[in-house]
Amino acid sequence: MKDAYSFDKDETGFKISYDLMAKTYKKIFDQLSLKTIIVESDNGYIGGEYCHEFVVESPIGETKFLTTSDGFYAAHQDVAKFKRDMVNENEPIMSMKIIQQPQWIKTMEDNIKHYKKPKSYFLKNVVYKNRITKDIIIAVIRGDLEVNKMKLEHVLNLVGQLNEASLDDLLRIGTKPGYVHSWGHKNVTYVADISLKTVTNFIGGQKEDETDSINVNYGRDFKCDYEDDIALAQPGHLSESGKELILKRGIEVGNIFQLGYHYSKKMKDATFTNFDGQLKPYYMGCYGIGIGRTMAAIVEVHNDKNGIIWPQNIAPYQVHLIGLDLQNDAIQKQAVKIYHNLLEKGIEVLFDDRIDIRAGQKFAEADLIGIPWRLLVSTKTGENVELKKRSETKTEVISIEETIKLINQ
């Protein structure tokens, strides 16, 4: 990993450094012939709004992210934002009621079958436990959405501390699976997703053995301790700009993120003297490129059925020189002469001077290795060479002088 850090006097200076590094990394990857997508990601317990990954799209990549077709927005699923459309805004607001309900209704699917309404009309409660304090948190969300635990942890400033509640946890607050209330449990923190404002007359929220509530409206009938975006974005949702989100995969090759004062306040002498003579901690940023991952991504992107096709400015050699008929002293001398000629011109050469290997095997191995230019010296080429670009199929026999000009273009 190639790491870099920035040290600024405040967040304003950090933003300038951050933007500069983002542009620099993009330029580096462009020069490596890697088309990268800058993807918003999570900064973990450090927090902060500045955190991005450079991702090369690939069907085998381990990184999953959501993006729009125009490419203007891309984010990891656990941080992606999306629009919540109004579900039934024209429906008149009704008075909340507690009604009789058949005992067989226990799941969301049962509710849909009984009420003949889509999932979005129902309240959903998901229960978590703080694994350190053992406190219970209930996330309340629209029935067609899923809770994003990472977003929830950030809202509560409890990153890495929440687990799904167990049966014992539910019993401790006086409830059981399928009967969790959207309000009213004691010693519980309630967190509402902003989707609760998109539905008029919710169904659910106060489930008992034979009753439940209907015509429940958030803000009028109940409110939560926190209200924020805690929903998991899914393919098909609309971005905040109204574009459909598409799920893609890719290989992460670099990242940049905000450290703020997280480390500088803990490090001795990580300070500067400000204009009034006081020592202040640096506002830091962190930047990294995965060298090995970048090379692997180049290979993954630049290849064909025969092997690698190295881009010119990242290839281990510029030229793969193949000698055939090397048992002929004249041909061998010609091949060695061309090899030294290329080296003198500053061209890096891999010279295949093996005598006991057939031409077909040498050509196959050259394609597999993928060096940009292949030069062939044989009895057929005479004083010239056969030139072939790895990314093309055509060959031509030209002088070594013309070859050097083409390679150096």
Image (tube, rainbow, N blue to C red):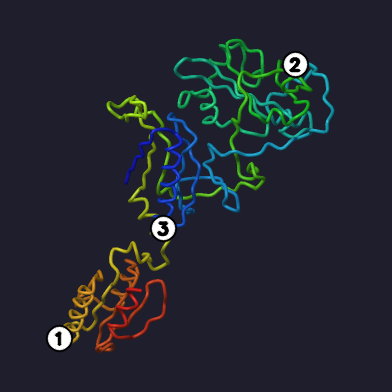
Nearest the camera: 285 or 321? Answer: 285
- Image location of residue 180, percent across then percent down: 64, 18
Q: CA distance from mark 3 to mark 1?
A: 41 Å
For the point 48% across and 23% down, the residue is: 158
Residue 354 image-quadrant placement: bottom left
Using the image, determine if residue 353 lies above or below residue 51. Answer: below
- Image location of residue 252, percent across then percent down: 43, 47
Count numbered badges in the picture: 3
* Amino acid type, callout 3: Glu
Using the image, tell me which numbered label, if any, was put on residue 378: none
Q: Which residue is mark 1?
A: 329
Looking at the image, residue 41 sits to the left or right of residue 293; the answer is right
Using the image, tell me which numbered label, if any, was put on residue 210: 2
Nearest the camera: 53 or 293? Answer: 53
- Image location of residue 308, percent across then percent down: 37, 64
Residue 237 image-quadrant placement: top right
Nearest the camera: 362 or 318? Answer: 318
**Can residue 308 be seen in the rendering of this structure?**
no
Mark 3 burial class by Cα count in 10 Å: few <14, some 14-19, many 20+ = some
Nearer the observer: mark 1 or 2; the answer is: 1
Using the image, determine if residue 200 lies above or below residue 313. Answer: above
* Amino acid type, callout 1: Asp
* Amino acid type, callout 2: Glu
Q: Which residue is mark 3?
A: 300
Nearest the camera: 341 or 27? Answer: 27
For the point 33% across and 86% down, the residue is: 397
For the point 30% across and 27% down, the residue is: 267
Lower position in the chain sequence, tag 1 or tag 2:
2
Looking at the image, residue 302 sits to the left or right of residue 215; the answer is left
